Amino acid sequence: MSYFNKVLLLGTGPTVIQLAVNFKNYFNGKVAIAGRESLRSKIFFETIVQHQLALKVFIQNKQHQPVAGECTIDALFEGYHTIHGIWDTVVLSVTTDSYLSVLAQLDAKVLKDVSCFILISPTFGSSHLIKSFLKKLSPQAEVISFSTYYGDTRWFDDIPSNEVLTTGVKKTVFIGSTCSKSQRLNELSLLFNRLGIQLKKVASPLEAETRNISLYVHPPLFMNEFSLQAIFDEQNTPKYVYKLYPEGPITYTTIRYLLNYWKEMMAIVNYFHIQPLNLLRFMVDDNYPLLPKSIDRQEIENFIKLESIHQEYLLYIRYASLLIDPYSKPNQEGKYFDFSAVPLRRIFINHDGEWDIPRMPKEDYYRVKIIQGIAKALKLKSPTLDHLVQTYEEKLQQVVATSAHKTYSEAFQVKSFSQDIEMICNGLSKNPQ
């Protein structure tokens, strides 16, 4: 008997289509999707209804064929308050900063029947936030955290529909559960093995949440004056996230912030007796590999033990080595694929007619504020983290103050996220893992 007989997926992004197809086709149980009511999600719901709840996942590369497929889901709920029925599993495929507001909209009776909550793209502390929220409703519920979503999935032409394109699939994803002998993890491992993805089990959801490269690299790369100017100010020349200055934000100073921020994170991780992360090895082995001649293997293995200036040098070499894709085939001019040409996306007008901030750095702001709150609760110094937060918040205030005639979304507000931080820290003090 499967533990995933009745799966409720929360979210209206492309990720939820991929998840629905994989859960439905492997476990062959009941699958439903629920999402918030908005102008953008209205298109999503209407298209799925028009296609009689049929969903399709297409792939860009043949080697990712196992994740492709189609299915017909069993129910669709427009508005979280409309959810009814009994569900054994709830999968949160929404942004981490909306976990509380989304779950608060679900009927208490629905939540009490759920025996497992799966967090697809959590940040550090998310599992404790969910456990804290559930302590009166469903204290025995299992919470499972993935380190990150397992692919790169998008809409065709950026228009929500019942069809998505998955352009990339991760080889490895980390996963942890609040249940030490979780049978659900075993079932998920079998599913992901079928998809060609290795699920690495770790001791706890909190540990899984530390195995996300974005946690370490996004804040320093996005929350600096260069990147924020490219995102918020009117510029004709595009700038790129992973390029060296002046094409991108990477300078020796940025690298120093990245290194020091990682060290501050490791001080927090160490407090909870979680295995420390060798940043360089994680970058090379679990994210984008380098050619062996770029950095010696012994340097990678000993990264944690090296002096700071040596560590900075190796991190700079790593980014310089990935300006192009070293494993791509050069063209007739001997040029390799421009791997680092990921644009810094500018602020935009959303479907509500408000100026809004791209997912990066909007989601990273929540991430660093939560970590900053945890560090303060533990009485750990975090000057680099504090600097990144201050730089970002000052930019928000500056933009709003100088353009009073424009309408801005709530993303432009300086926030404390005090409720989330308090709930997470209460959970951490009672159960460090």
Image: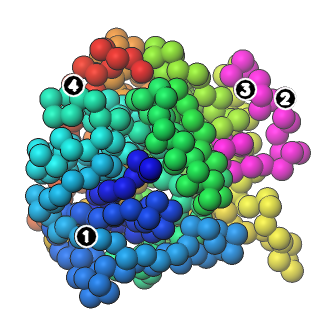
Residue bearing mark 2:
298
Q: In the rendered structure, which disc, 1 or 2, sits on the residue that comes first in sequence? A: 1
Kind of residue indicated by mark 2: Gln
What is the residue that sits farthest to the front in this orientation?
1
Instruction: Select label 4 or label 3 by which is in front.
Output: 4
Q: Residues within 10 Å of mark 1 (few under 14, many from 20)?
A: some
- Label 3's element? helix
In 3D space, how far apart are the residues under numbered discs 4 and 3 (Cα atoms)? Answer: 34 Å
Picture coordinates of residue 268 (x, y %)? Answer: 45, 20
Specify the segment rendered in magenta: 283-306
Identify the image quadrant of residue 83.
Answer: bottom left
Q: In the rendered structure, which disc, 4 or 2, sits on the residue that comes first in sequence? A: 2
Kind of residue indicated by mark 1: Ala
Kindly identify which numbered label has been placed on residue 75.
Answer: 1
Kindly identify which numbered label has been placed on residue 303.
Answer: 3
* Marks 4 & 2, CB-CB < 8 Å contact: no
- Label 4's element? helix
Along the viewing direction, whichever of 159 and 302 lies nearer the viewer: 159
Q: In the rendered structure, which disc, 4 or 3, sits on the residue that comes first in sequence? A: 3
In 3D space, how far apart are the residues under numbered discs 3 and 2 (Cα atoms)? Answer: 8 Å
**Is 297 one of the magenta-colored residues?**
yes
Kindly identify which numbered label has been placed on residue 422.
Answer: 4
Along the viewing direction, whichever of 121 and 314 lies nearer the viewer: 121
- Label 1's element? strand
Q: In which quarter of the image is the C terminus?
A: top left
Residue at horizontal 24%, vertical 48%? 98
Kind of residue indicated by mark 3: Phe
Instruction: Select label 1 or label 2 by which is in front.
Output: 1
**Is 116 one of the magenta-colored residues?**
no
Picture coordinates of residue 131 (x, y %)? Answer: 28, 31
Residue at horizontal 49%, vertical 21%? 269
Q: In the rendered structure, which disc, 1 or 3, sits on the residue that comes first in sequence? A: 1
